[in-house]
Image (cartoon, rainbow, N blue to C red):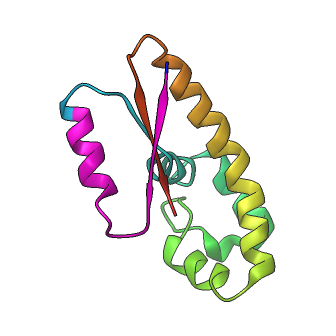
Amino acid sequence: MPVVALTGGIGCGKSEACRIFTELGVPVVDLDKISHQLTSAGASLVQTIAQTFGDRYVTAEGAMDRALMRELVFSNVAARERLNAILHPAIYQQAIAQLKLNQSATYQILAIPL
């Protein structure tokens, strides 16, 4: 099962391309969506994020506060590296699991934000 990587920065059309591939029946594994799921309310990584960065980086609903975290990691390299060390292995594991679910597909798309 070939995997085609679809990469690009914000606003380059990745989401639109993924939508079209999905409409055509091509499986799409989107790392940005996985990241959002892993940091949503009740997700296991949120507790690790709170322990690492403090409770203020978790919303009242129990999700990672993306705006506050963005502010921190774009101004602090060490904080960005700590967050990446938490998120990247979990995103990788989830992506591999999703790719394995689609092994019978002719090909699939792996959408990777830059």
Residue 98 vs 49, above or below: the answer is above
Residue 69 vs 40, above or below: the answer is below
Locate residue 21 relative to residue 67 in the image: left or right.
left
Residue 7 x/y as whole percent? 45, 55
Front in this rendered view, residue 59 or 113: 113
Locate residue 13 relative to residue 46 in the image: left or right.
left
Residue 2 x/y as whole percent? 49, 24
Q: How many marks?
A: 0
Locate residue 68 relative to residue 108 in the image: left or right.
right
What's the residue at 58%, 85% (across, down)?
71
Front in this rendered view, residue 75 or 18: 18
Residue 74 x/y as whole percent? 62, 83
Quarter of the rendering containing residue 18:
top left
Residue 87 x/y as whole percent? 68, 54
Magenta residue span: 2-22
Residue 59 vs 27, above or below: the answer is below
What's the residue at 49%, 47% (across, down)?
37
